[in-house]
Image: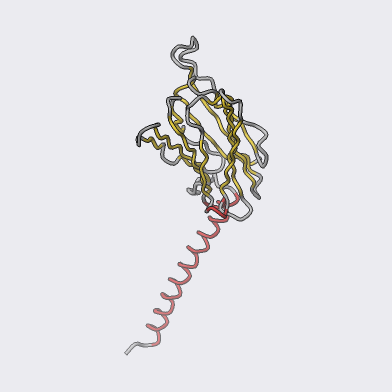
Amino acid sequence: MTNWWEKVNVSAAVAGVIVGVAGIAITLWNQEIRCLINSSGNNCSKNIFCMKNTRIQAGSSESYDSDWKCVKESTTSDWIELGDDNLWKSYLEFKAESHLKSPNTKICAFYSRLSSDSGNTIKENKCSEKSNNYENKIELGDDTGWINQKLAFTISSPKNYQICLELLKQEKRENPNLGRRPSTGWICNSENPDNYIDLGDDFKYYNQVLKFKIIKQ
């Protein structure tokens, strides 16, 4: 027969477990709140934005996928390889993650290119927002003679973010500047596509790589 003291001890043990579980839940909740405020904290492992590039060679099914490159707030992504101007059809995919998945956040890509033959300019823009599960992709041309190619990203967010791009590209082998890989530097935008990086002209560049970051203004 269980005596009164045993019941007290069991009740105390159960209460201790409940308090312990509640304490862990509160700690995790507080950490989540801190990560929403400052996602670059040491204990905040959630990425907030990702990109990847997929290239498909013309006339074949051969493709190259860079895999997803992701960042937290104020961190810099690994380089995304955009490859060489050698008849590839290229797609840049992007998606919001973690607390960027909110109805008030929208990330958009803007790309334009000019036809060297017809003189026509093609402009495209796609957005990562709630209606498409915060993921989208944009086509970066097909290496068939486009010139004056420009790319920009924008971000609209309650946290007043900027999204920044940096590009390196190397001249073709016949160019005397072989070996140089000049950087565009960081090109940043918030809600409006005011600043573009220059992707250059087809048949001119190789070893093209892109990286990005999201910073708070």
Towards the viewer: 135 or 79: 135
Residue most extreme to the top: 176
Instruction: Give the percent coordinates (x, y) of residue 162.
Output: 63, 40
| Quadrant into which the C terminus falls | top right
Towards the viewer: 55 or 1: 55
Residue most extreme to the bottom: 1
Note whether 85 is above or below 65 in the view shown.
Answer: above
Image quadrant assignment for residue 149 = top right
Image quadrant assignment for residue 195 = top right
| Quadrant into which the N terminus falls | bottom left
- Name the residue at 58% across, 47% down: 38
Note whether 138 is above or below 44 in the view shown.
Answer: above
Note whether 71 is above or below 165 in the view shown.
Answer: below
Instruction: Give the percent coordinates (x, y) of residue 193.
Output: 65, 37
Taking 60 as reference, is 209 left or right?
right
Instruction: Give the percent coordinates (x, y) of residue 215.
Output: 60, 40
Instruction: Give the percent coordinates (x, y) of residue 147.
Output: 56, 24
Q: How many labels does the image show?
A: 0
Q: How is the image coloured?
A: secondary structure
Note whether 205 is above or below 43 in the view shown.
Answer: above
Residue most extreme to the left: 1
Residue 184 in sight from this viewpoint: no
Taking 33 as reference, is 203 left or right?
left
- Name the residue at 53% across, 23% down: 201
Residue 53 in sight from this viewpoint: yes
